[in-house]
Image (cartoon, rainbow, N blue to C red):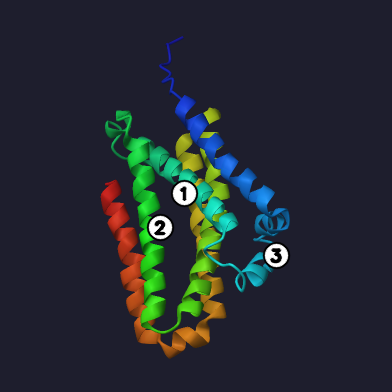
Amino acid sequence: MEPINRTILQTDWITITLFTSFICVLIAKSFDYTRFVNFIILPFNNKYITIYTKKEKLFNWFHILISLFQIINTTLFIYFIWREFLNTGVVKNPFLFPILLVVVFLFITLKTVVQLANGFVFNSYKTFNELIFKKLTYLNYSGIVLCIANIFLTYVAIDHKIIIIIGSILFIAINIIGWLTVLRNYQNFISSYFFYFILYLCALEIAPLVIMGSFLK
């Protein structure tokens, strides 16, 4: 029998990172258990969107904590992608994950702020607030999928590439559903500002993703 080399990865910091994200969820759950349950069943029942779109929207502790959970797990998933497919040498840098975390946090925060600023420009702040809330809600829910994928990638000895591909597909699918929901609910508003919507789509949705992809490379 030929010996097989096994690479033992240090998972202590990953365990701490996942545990931190779980704490965000537990605190959010303690704040509003009913809201948490409605959030968990989002793919099967649109009650969460219906109830909370008209309420506190973005600036609410529950939404902020769930967003932090999503940001942490998105960053960790990007780290695994980087380690598996991209520059493996850079992965040895102990500051890689903190740098990625800051970049993802700033990316989502600045993108949200600029989108809200557009609401002021077009005198449609309330509509933009609701639109962004719905998109971020589906983005936050996709964080659950990435969290499960991160657990498998950390503790289960299976093909990481398969897990990354499945996690990426589910992540994209959930966010496409979110986008379709937004387009369906705001089709009259979008048709009234169709030209500006195209500019918005290119400048604030597609361009940031291209920039983020370029950064990862």
- Vertical placement of residue 13 versus 97, above or below: above
> Amino acid type of disc 3?
Asn
Q: Is residue 161 left or right of residue 35?
A: left
The crowd level at tag 3 (other Cα within 10 Å; few <14, some 14-19, many 20+) is few
CA gap between label 2 and label 1 equals 8 Å
- Vertical placement of residue 120 versus 46, above or below: below
> How far across and how far down the image is residue 78, in percent?
40, 44
Mark 2 or mark 1, earlier in chain: 1
Q: Which residue: 53% across, 55% down?
A: 64
Q: Which residue: 30% across, 65% down?
A: 207
Q: Which residue is mark 3?
A: 45
Q: Which residue: 40% across, 57% down?
A: 108
Q: Are marks 2 and 3 in contact (CB under 8 Å)?
A: no
CA gap between label 1 and label 3 equals 24 Å
Q: Are marks 2 and 1 in contact (CB under 8 Å)?
A: yes
Q: Which residue is mark 1?
A: 71
Q: Which residue: 45% across, 88% down?
A: 191
> How far across and how far down the image is residue 63, in percent?
56, 58
Between 149 and 24, the residue placed more toward the observer is 24
> Amino acid type of disc 2?
Ile
Assign a secondary structure to mark 3: loop
The crowd level at tag 1 (other Cα within 10 Å; few <14, some 14-19, many 20+) is many
The crowd level at tag 2 (other Cα within 10 Å; few <14, some 14-19, many 20+) is some
Q: Are marks 1 and 3 in contact (CB under 8 Å)?
A: no
Asked if residue 35 can be seen in this view, the reply is yes
Q: Which residue is mark 2?
A: 108
Mark 2 or mark 3, earlier in chain: 3
